[in-house]
Amino acid sequence: MRYGLMSGCIPGTYPEVIEACGKIGFDGVELDIGADYAENMLWQANGRKEIAKLLKQAEVELASVCLGTFWTYSFADPDVAVRERGRGFTTDAINWCAELGAKVILVPITPGKPDEGEEAPQRWIEQLKQVAPAAEKAKVTLAIENVGRGCGKTADALIKIADAVASPYVQVYYDFGNGLSLGNDPVAEIPKLGKRIAQVHAKDPGGQYLGEGRLDMAAVSGALKKTGYDRYLVLETPSTDDPPGAAARNLRFLKEKF
């Protein structure tokens, strides 16, 4: 198993987060990308060179990038121009990940505006089909995540989308904390997803630190191990008033329990 940290867990710039991940002992970092993606370091040649240098210095991998951009520009949006923009930044992200050695892109299944409607899942399927060939060529997995809004709240919904796209490079990014918060049972959803799980987010609803919330972490760990999963567990936990300390504590918990 490898252990990563989502950049939002430690407030600061990418360079500051990468340096902190190295000092704390993480194997990798997940860089979150917002609506202002065009200004992001990853979209600048010099910025990518800087990130590559920092990763090497910190002895940390780029575990993945999170296209939080989809919360502003969703593939479910009824506006064709918005969906086209989504294909553009997704293709860019695929290229940047291939360049920097990352194998996974987190794709949150976000709603369209003003509400997603019944056409949302089909829009997601259609758009993912269009970007899947670029992912396959680059060998970068687009991993769709269960999030609090949108049409991908359950394992069944994610399976329906992934199976309809029918690409080995469109899989699932499972967040077991989100699963519980959305009223599902992660211990039942994990085996249902099985080998479709490309990467995992770790959080514990109701607790400031892992192990203090409502999840049965031993049962979640057992379910994940039974699938044969042995890739990244990425923390997406509260930063608290001591972000490095919280990250270190949660990393110790993951290593002990998973």
Image (cartoon, rainbow, N blue to C red):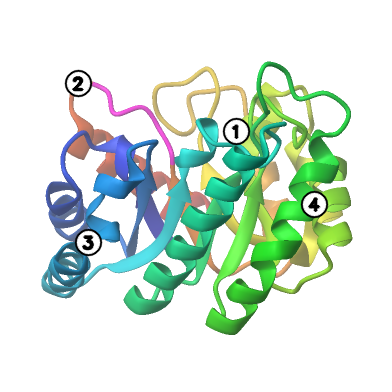
Give the spatial CA distance, label 1 vs label 3. 33 Å
Amino acid type, label 1? Gly
The CA span between labels 3 and 4 is 29 Å
Q: Amino acid at mark 2?
A: Asp
**Rendering coords of residue 226 (x, y %):** 75, 63
Q: Place residue 13 in its image quadrant.
A: top left
For the question of whether residue 188 can be seen, the reply is no
The span picked out in magenta is 236-240
Callout 2 crowding tier (Cα within 10 Å): few <14, some 14–19, many ≥20: few
Using the rendered view, name the quadrant where residue 19 is placed. Answer: bottom left
Residue visible at 68% across and 28% down in the picture: 111
Residue shown at 82%/40% (left/top)? 121
Q: Position of residue 223 (x, y in %)?
A: 74, 52
Query: In percent of the image, x 47 and y 21: which residue is there?
Result: 207
First in residue order: circle 3 vs circle 2: 3
Residue picked out by circle 2 = 241
**1 or 2: tag closer to the N-terminus:** 1
How crowded pointer 4 is (Cα within 10 Å; few <14, some 14-19, many 20+) is rated as some
The magenta stretch spans residue 237: yes
Q: Amino acid at mark 3?
A: Gln
Q: Earlier in the sequence, mark 2 or mark 4?
A: 4
Mark earlier in primary sequence (1, 3): 3
Is residue 256 placed above or below 185 in the rendered structure?
A: below
